């Protein structure tokens, strides 16, 4: 029991012990990082933290890690600088992708047609690793009961399935 209490104390006590300074540092650091992320998102655009192409996903995962590091480590400059560089890199890649089809082919997944003219494209579904269950879920969300009512269903580069009714 003493071991459990000792471990619990270690887990629940910040390095150097509890103090007003620790609480203020965590609260101020968290609010500062929050404001910084909001500012970056407003400047860089909604795609930075919302859409999920491969590199957008990477940006989101790495951003989460950097924000957590900034909040828990008490060091703001390095993680915020890393986050700024990451957002700038994501912005450059997405801007370049919008301008150049060559860049787009390198960094974005191509859309995949899963259903065409009411017929499932099994080979495309298998290659894109889209299950029948996922396709049916997307059809239901679009208000379609089956593939017969679908002109086209496309797995978009961001991972969503767009459904066009017949």
Image (spheres, rainbow, N blue to C red):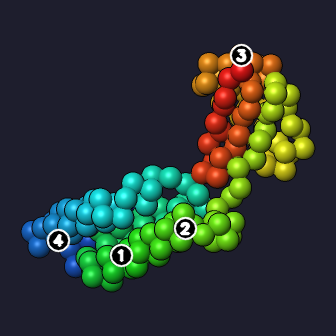
The x and y percentages for residue 150 are 74, 24
Query: Which label's residue is closer to the chain start, 4 or 2?
Result: 4
Q: CA distance from mark 3 to mark 1?
A: 45 Å
**Residue identifier under label 2:** 99
Query: Which label's residue is closer to the chain start, 3 or 1?
Result: 1
> How packed is label 2: few (under 14 Cα within 10 Å), some, or many (20 or more)?
few
Q: CA distance from mark 3 to mark 4?
A: 54 Å
Tell me if I can see residue 2 in this picture.
no
**Residue identifier under label 3:** 145
Residue 84: mark = 1
The x and y percentages for residue 93 are 53, 71
The quadrant in which residue 33 appears is bottom left
- Residue at 55 percent across and 54 percent down: it is 52
> How packed is label 4: few (under 14 Cα within 10 Å), some, or many (20 or more)?
some
> How packed is label 3: few (under 14 Cα within 10 Å), some, or many (20 or more)?
few
Given contact means CB atoms under 8 Å apart, are the residues at marks 2 and 3 in contact? no
In front here: 7 or 49?
Answer: 49
Query: Which label's residue is closer to the chain start, 3 or 4?
Result: 4
Residue at the farthest left position: 20
The quadrant in which residue 124 appears is top right
**Helix or strand or loop: what does disc 2 sit on?**
helix
The x and y percentages for residue 139 are 68, 26
Left or right of residue 130, residue 76 in this image: left
**Residue identifier under label 4:** 25
Given contact means CB atoms under 8 Å apart, are the residues at marks 1 and 2 in contact? no
Q: CA distance from mark 1 to mark 2?
A: 22 Å
**Helix or strand or loop: what does disc 4 sit on?**
helix
Mark nearest the camera among 1 and 2 is 2
In front here: 144 or 130?
Answer: 144
Residue at the farthest right position: 123
Query: Which label's residue is closer to the chain start, 2 or 3?
Result: 2
């Amino acid at each position: 029991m003493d071991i459990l209490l000792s471990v619990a104390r270690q887990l629940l006590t910040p390095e150097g012990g509890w103090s007003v300074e620790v609480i203020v540092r965590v609260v101020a650091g968290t609010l500062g990082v929050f404001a910084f992320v909001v500012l970056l998102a407003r400047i860089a655009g909604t795609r930075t933290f919302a859409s999920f192409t491969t590199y957008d996903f990477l940006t989101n995962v790495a951003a989460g890690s950097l924000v957590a590091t900034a909040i828990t480590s008490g060091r703001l400059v390095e993680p915020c600088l890393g986050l700024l560089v990451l957002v700038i890199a994501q912005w450059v890649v997405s801007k370049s992708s919008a301008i150049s089809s060559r860049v787009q082919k390198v960094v974005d997944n191509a859309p995949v047609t899963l259903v065409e003219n009411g017929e499932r494209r099994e080979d495309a579904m298998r290659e894109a690793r889209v299950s029948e269950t996922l396709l049916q879920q997307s059809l239901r969300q679009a208000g379609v009961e089956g593939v017969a009512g679908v002109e086209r269903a496309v797995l978009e580069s961001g991972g969503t399935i767009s459904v066009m009714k017949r």
